[in-house]
Amino acid sequence: MMTLCMVMLLFVTGAMAQDNTPAAWDAKGEVRYKRRILAIKDQVWGWDLPAFKKRTIPDEYKNESAVVLAKHVDLRTFDDDHEIHRTVRVLLKINDKAALEEYSEFTFNQYELESMGQVLDPFDKFTTMNYVGVRVYKPDGKMREIYSDEAVVTEVDRRSKKVRKLAIPDLQVGDLVEYFLRSERYVIHTNAYTEELFVLGDEEPVMEYSVHVEAWKKVFALEYLAMNGAPDFKENIDDDMMKLDLLVKNIPPQPVKLWMNPFRQIPMIRLHLCIGIRREMPGRRKEGTIYRNPNSLKVKGESRIELGNAVNMAGKATLPYLDEVTRQIKDYKKEHSNVTDEQLAAYIYYLVRYIGLYRVKPGDPIFVDQRRNYSRLNERYFLIYVNYLLEKNKIQADFMMVTPRYGPSQEQTFDTEDYSVVLKTKGNKPVFMSGEGIFSNAYYVPNQYEGQKAPVVKWGDAFAEEEIPLSPATANKQSEHYKISFGKSDLQQLEIERNSSVTGHFKTDIQKNLLLFEDYYEEERKALGIKESFMEEFADSRKNRSLAEEYRSAFDKARKDVKESFLTEVKEQFDKAPESLDNYKVLKMGLRHTDPEMTYTTSFKMNGLMKKAGNNYILDAGKLIGSQMSIKPSQRERKADVHMPFARMFEYIMEFNIPAGYTVEGADKLTRNIDNEWGSFIVTTDSKDGKLIIQVKKVYKNAIVPAAKWPLLLQMIDSAEEFQQQKILLKKA
């Protein structure tokens, strides 16, 4: 078992990963890959599955974008070498342009590495290999085959996955597409397992969905949980193999991509295929045994035991930098004699965050660009460290075990990893703490934990239960203030000065994309009272002086490169790239609960929103709030409750400096006033002092909306989409 000290220092991020691309891939990988896919295609296409011979779809689904006539998942193991093959085979009908676009190419990772070391052979036991095969059937009976060895390599990403793109040429509406996805891997640890998920519902209707699992009795154990009304597998155990089979017909379409929570709303089966042991132990399964629908209360108890063991270990292990952290807390209390428990708890939280994610030591890899912003610590061990320090400073806190909102409910937990951990201090002003990432604040609760009833851990006692509060829309706000002028030489070019701010759950993604390590490191170091920066330490050291110069060079490069991130942010907001980005700056980083707002400015020129019409100009005013959601006809009637990430608010203030000699017409048509218990979209306009001022407010008032109230939410969504199409006229006086 890895010690707590070691776990605390593990970054769960691609930013710190080594370059472990298989060195032998170019030399022999392609030849072996081509040879292997020839064998796979003969095997998969040779399966005798009657559902794949059907070619007609029911009349009720003829207007669906695509219809899946057959889907089959095959999972099987191979004797003592612990090899697992997983194959998905699908036959579907393309009914419209949306489905045509979706299936016109397949993007996949050709291989995925399991180890952090250098891998010389891309086909060894530390690599998962992926293969794709596609058949296209034309209405006239012609058939074409395309395979993943023909795919174009697009990149080798940070996690050393060779990304390929397989184009399907000449695909047309009315075609049938049959494809398979095959992955081949090994289970390489005695306590490892493969997590399988069979979801019985998707955007497309499925006529037949079948699953077949085969696992060797003398090596593996099988464990599965049927959720949300899904049927159990049919089980069969013979002399050598354990087999599971499932067949479900006529699965209706579900708006899976439109605010659904599959783990709690769609029938599904979760399966573990794991290396067994000779006798059952906590967290381990006996070989040759099938475990059906484990008890969720038992899972909850096992999770508490795991957490308790980790907490107890913290009292015995040598925590990283404990002497330094203790001294820092002591100095803080000496300088702040009237500090409250809430203030001290927050200080401890930020100090541990700094030690784990901000601190730099001489042997660390030099990562100072946006990649570092995705760093995070193991949440459980981070909070255990915080709790240890709270206890040492006589601040009481409780651990809460929470199942994230987009995961299974407590009543349908499958294993202990279904539970995450939140720490909550006791007292009149409790502080909720989580380990969401490098920018997580004390008092911040990730949106996936909000609204969940969570067991409060009482060691040796029965579970108490407490609901984690939901944040209101006002706490999750994106505000935009534009000052817009028209180009002096060309009125068709807009010159925009933009001030933006984000709070709550909106903040993390913007911070990851726009903040620089150099800036937030310095701000936090000073806020914590740490006197000397690592750059000063390195510069004062003869041994590490050159490192300071390397970091300075890396800082300068990251500051130049961040312009691309700002360009991307503007493009995403306006759904088009600016002609030029003239200024960009972060004003407030939002690193702490005491200063929770992140603000930044951008100045840029934008073409394409203003068009000349004779002596006049037409402005696409509605497009300045960015693209808006469009609800498809098939989604307008809904039986499933709406599960959105969080309640939220958008505000836009747009000030137009009207050019001399022009007047504005059509501004009155911009106004809207949709406001009900579930959402609002309100637009007001005003003209004064040669300016047109448009104010827009859009609010999703609740994260969860009952299906019966979907029409009320639709009113707001439709109104926003209609506004996005509105224009105003600049008329020559």
Image (tube, rainbow, N blue to C red):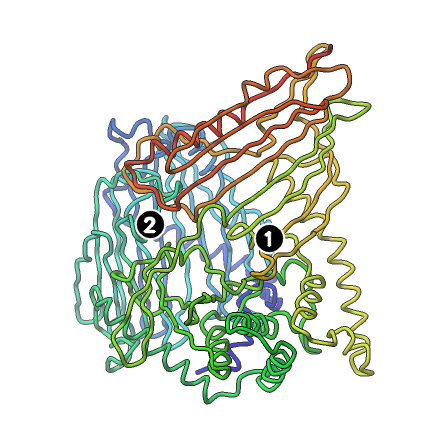
The image's mark for residue 262 is 2
- Which residue type carries mark 2? Pro
> Residue 338: x and y, percent?
58, 75
First-in-chain label (2 vs 1): 2
**At numbered mark 1, what does the secondary structure look like: helix, strand or loop?**
loop
Looking at the rendering, in which quadrant would you find the C terminus? top right
Between residue 302 and residue 365, name the one nearer to us: 302
Between residue 529 and residue 155, name the one nearer to us: 529
Q: Is residue 134 left or right of residue 591?
A: left
> Residue 618: x and y, percent?
65, 18
Quadrant in the picture for residue 663 = top right
Distance between the Cα atoms at labels 2 and 1? Answer: 32 Å
Identity of the residue furthest to the front in this view: 338
- Asked whether the viewer can see residue 119, the reply is no
Asked if 231 appears above or below 484 in the picture, the reply is below
Asked if 646 appears above or below 58 in the picture, the reply is below
> Residue 101: x and y, percent?
48, 34
Quadrant in the picture for residue 333 = bottom right
The image's mark for residue 597 is 1
Q: Is residue 359 left or right of residue 542?
A: left
Q: Residue at x 56, y 52 (%)?
A: 507
- Which residue type carries mark 1? Glu
How crowded pointer 1 is (Cα within 10 Å; few <14, some 14-19, many 20+) is rated as: some
Q: Is residue 459 left or right of residue 101?
A: left
